[in-house]
């Protein structure tokens, strides 16, 4: 690999990352406007979409990585889109999330920036589902 070729690849990766961050910031501004019911609706819809695609995603993960067992990947996908969403369904992530009358503290949920997640080759789809859903939930 020549030095010039490596620079082109690095620039391309950097440009891609910059574009993704800009899109993330634009999405953040839109998500910031949403109320809890709207956020929960989006999370529920995303969870159903993941549920509908869990088998196909598991198949692609197994074929692409050559790791693990298809059925295990499908089960992990089901867990990510079912159990995880069910577990966080009552969590408040918009506006005032806690008030302590004794200390006078009020906790307010507020998005702070773009989230970047690493996806392992061992569990690519279940990890992506999980991270996407919790990212949507927290705006």
Image: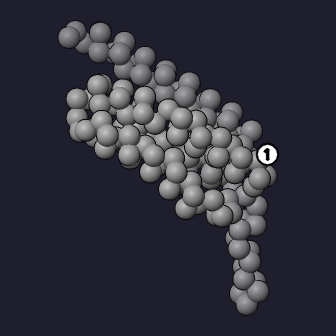
- For the residue pair 77 and 104, the one nearer the viewer reads as 77
- For the residue pair 99 and 36, the one nearer the viewer reads as 36
* Image coordinates for residue 55, horizontal then vertical, percent: 42, 33
> Which image quarter holds the N terminus?
top left
Q: How many marks?
A: 1
* Image coordinates for residue 136, horizontal then vertical, percent: 61, 46
For label 1, the SS is: loop
Q: Residue at x 56, y 54 (%)?
A: 85
Q: Determine whether 129 is above or below 16 in the image.
A: below
Q: How is the image coloured?
A: one colour
Q: Which residue is mark 1?
A: 33
Which residue is at the far left? 1
Q: Is residue 72 visible?
A: yes
Q: Is residue 112 visible?
A: no
Q: Determine whether 70 is above or below 136 in the image.
A: above
Q: Residue at x 43, y 43 (%)?
A: 77
Q: Determine whether 136 is above or below 10 in the image.
A: below
Is residue 54 left or right of 121 when viewed as pictured? Answer: right
Label 1: how many residues lie within 10 Å, few (<14), some (14-19) or many (20+)?
few
Q: Residue at x 55, y 62 (%)?
A: 87
Which residue is at the far bottom? 102
- For the residue pair 41 and 10, the one nearer the viewer reads as 41
Q: Residue at x 64, y 64 (%)?
A: 91
**In terms of image quadrants, where is residue 96?**
bottom right
* Image coordinates for residue 44, horizontal then vertical, percent: 65, 46
- For the residue pair 27 and 35, the one nearer the viewer reads as 35
**In terms of image quadrants, where is residue 103?**
bottom right
Is residue 82 left or right of 41 when viewed as pictured? Answer: left
* Image coordinates for residue 75, horizontal then vertical, percent: 38, 46
């Amino acid at each position: 690999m020549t030095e010039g070729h490596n620079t082109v690849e690095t620039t391309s990766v950097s440009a891609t990352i910059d574009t993704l961050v800009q899109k993330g910031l634009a999405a953040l501004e839109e998500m910031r406007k949403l109320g809890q019911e709207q956020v929960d609706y989006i999370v529920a819809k995303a969870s159903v979409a993941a549920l509908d695609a869990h088998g196909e995603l598991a198949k692609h993960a197994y074929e692409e990585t050559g790791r693990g067992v298809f059925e295990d990947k499908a089960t992990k996908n089901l867990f990510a889109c079912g159990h995880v969403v069910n577990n966080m369904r009552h969590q408040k992530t918009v506006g005032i999330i806690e008030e302590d009358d004794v200390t006078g503290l009020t906790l307010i949920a507020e998005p702070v920036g773009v989230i970047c997640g690493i996806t392992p080759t061992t569990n690519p789809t279940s990890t992506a589902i999980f991270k996407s859903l919790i990212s949507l939930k927290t705006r």
